[in-house]
Image: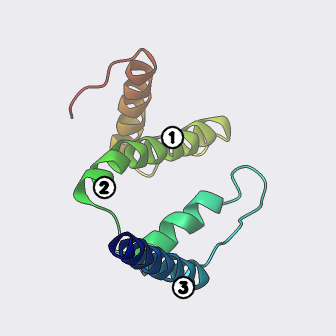
Amino acid sequence: MGAGASAEEKRSRELEKKLKEDADKDARTVKLLLLGAGESGKSTIVKQMKIIHKDGYSLEECLEFITIIYSNTLQSIMAIVKAMTTLNINYGHSDQQDDARKLMHLADTIEEGTMPKE
C-alpha cells in the first residue's frame, strides 16, 4: 500500500507542476479582441502582427497569397482603366491604350473562368 500511495503522490505532484506551468504560460499570453466593421482592416492587423512578432509566413503560406495579390492588383488596375474610360481621360501614349484594351480582354477571359499563363 505504501508503494501505491507513493506512486499516486508522485503523479499528483507531476500534475500539480504541469497545472502550474500551464497557468504561468496562460498568464503570459496576451489576448486581443479586434472589433470593427467589415473591410476595416482587422485581418490585415493580424497578418502584420504575425510578420512582425512571429516568424512571418512559410513559403507555402506565401504561395497561397500570390493568387490573392495578383487578383487584388488586377482588380485595382481594372478600376482605374474603367474610370479613365468613364471620365474620358486619355492615355499618354497609344501603346498604353492598346495595353488597356488587352487588359480588358484578359479580364473578360478571367470572368469566363480561364486565365492565360502570361
Residue 78 lies, in percent from the top left, at: 51, 39
| Disc 1 to disc 2, C-alpha distance | 20 Å
Q: Nearer the viewer, residue 117 or 32?
A: 32
In the rendered image, residue 110, in percent from the top left (x then y), is placed at 40, 23
Left or right placement of residue 103 versus residue 46 in this view: left
Residue drawn at x 69%, y 51% as measured from the top left: 39
- Which element carries disc 3, helix, strand or loop? helix
The vertical placement of 61 against 108, above or below, is below
Name the residue beneath numbered marker 3. Answer: 24
Residue denoted by label 2: 62
Q: Amino acid at mark 2?
A: Cys
Q: Return the x and y of residue 4 as percentages of the image width and height.
A: 37, 69
- Secondary structure of the residue carrying tag 1 is helix
Which is nearer the N-term, disc 3 or disc 2?
A: 3
Residue 104, picture quadrant: top left
As drawn, is 11 to the left or to the right of 34? Answer: left
Distance of mark 3 from mark 2, alpha carbons?
A: 33 Å
* Quadrant where the C terminus is found in the figure: top left
Query: Is residue 61 depicted above or below 44 in this figure?
Result: above
Q: Earlier in the sequence, mark 1 or mark 3?
A: 3
Q: Dots 1 and 3: beta carbons under 8 Å?
A: no
